[in-house]
Image (tube, grey):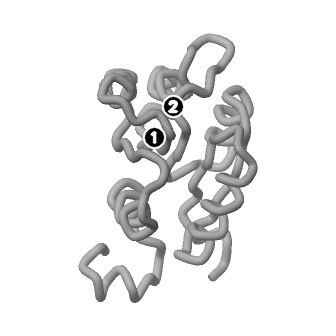
């Protein structure tokens, strides 16, 4: 599939291994993943790439915010982009904090891959021409 028609998904995580695994998974599923390890770069890439979804770990700061989610949701050009928090922070207080910051979904690491992909499809939509999504009822 042509990368220009794949929905762009921005991965924001300081861990290179997590970004690599998610990049491979999302590419295989029909998305165009872009990886960034810090907050200011994430804001710039989200603006430039026209991200359909941002998947971010919880406590990635930016210059003005302690959390990338809040920074994305306060940016007029990015506030409509859904944000899925994918994090190792599994306390109820962490989830409440993420929801208060404006995230659209919250999953803890590790998550079964079908659960993660279901959430990506819910938030970003199925890739264009995805026969699997139509068959599974995800389209």
Q: CA distance from mark 1 to mark 2?
A: 6 Å
Residue 83, given in percent of the width and then of the height, sits at 44, 41
Residue at the spot 37% in from the left edge and 42% down from the top edge: 106
* Residue topped by disc 1: 85
Q: Quadrant of the N terminus?
A: bottom right
* Residue topped by disc 2: 58
Residue 90 located left or right of residue 134: right
Callout 2: 10 Å neighbours few (<14), some, many (20+)? many
**Mark 1 vs 2, N-terminal side:** 2
Q: Nearer the viewer, residue 33 or 25?
A: 25
Residue 121, given in percent of the width and then of the height, sits at 38, 64
Residue 43, given in percent of the width and then of the height, sits at 65, 32
Q: Nearer the viewer, residue 62 or 15?
A: 15
Q: Is residue 89 above or below residue 67?
A: below
Residue at the spot 62% in from the left edge and 21% down from the top edge: 61
Q: Quadrant of the C terminus?
A: bottom left
Q: Is residue 66 above or below residue 108?
A: above
Residue 4 located left or right of residue 103: right
Q: Is residue 40 above or below residue 124?
A: above
Residue at the spot 59% in from the left edge and 77% down from the top edge: 28
Residue 125 in view (yes/no): no
Residue 31 in view (yes/no): yes
Secondary structure at badge 1 equals strand
Secondary structure at badge 2 equals loop
1 and 2 marks in contact (CB < 8 Å)? yes
Residue 100 located left or right of residue 29: left
């Amino acid at each position: 599939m042509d990368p220009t028609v794949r929905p762009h998904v921005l991965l924001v995580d300081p861990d290179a291994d997590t970004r690599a695994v998610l990049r491979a998974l999302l590419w295989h599923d029909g998305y165009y993943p872009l990886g960034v390890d810090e907050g200011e770069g994430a804001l710039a890439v989200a603006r430039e790439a026209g991200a359909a979804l941002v998947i971010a770990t919880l406590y990635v700061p930016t210059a003005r915010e302690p959390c990338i989610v809040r920074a994305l949701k306060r940016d007029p050009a990015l506030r409509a982009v859904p944000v899925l928090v994918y994090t190792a922070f599994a306390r109820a207080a962490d989830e409440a904090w993420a929801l208060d910051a404006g995230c659209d979904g919250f999953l803890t690491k590790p998550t079964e891959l079908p659960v993660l992909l279901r959430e990506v499809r819910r938030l970003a939509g199925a890739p264009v021409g995805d026969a699997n999504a139509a068959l599974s009822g995800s389209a």
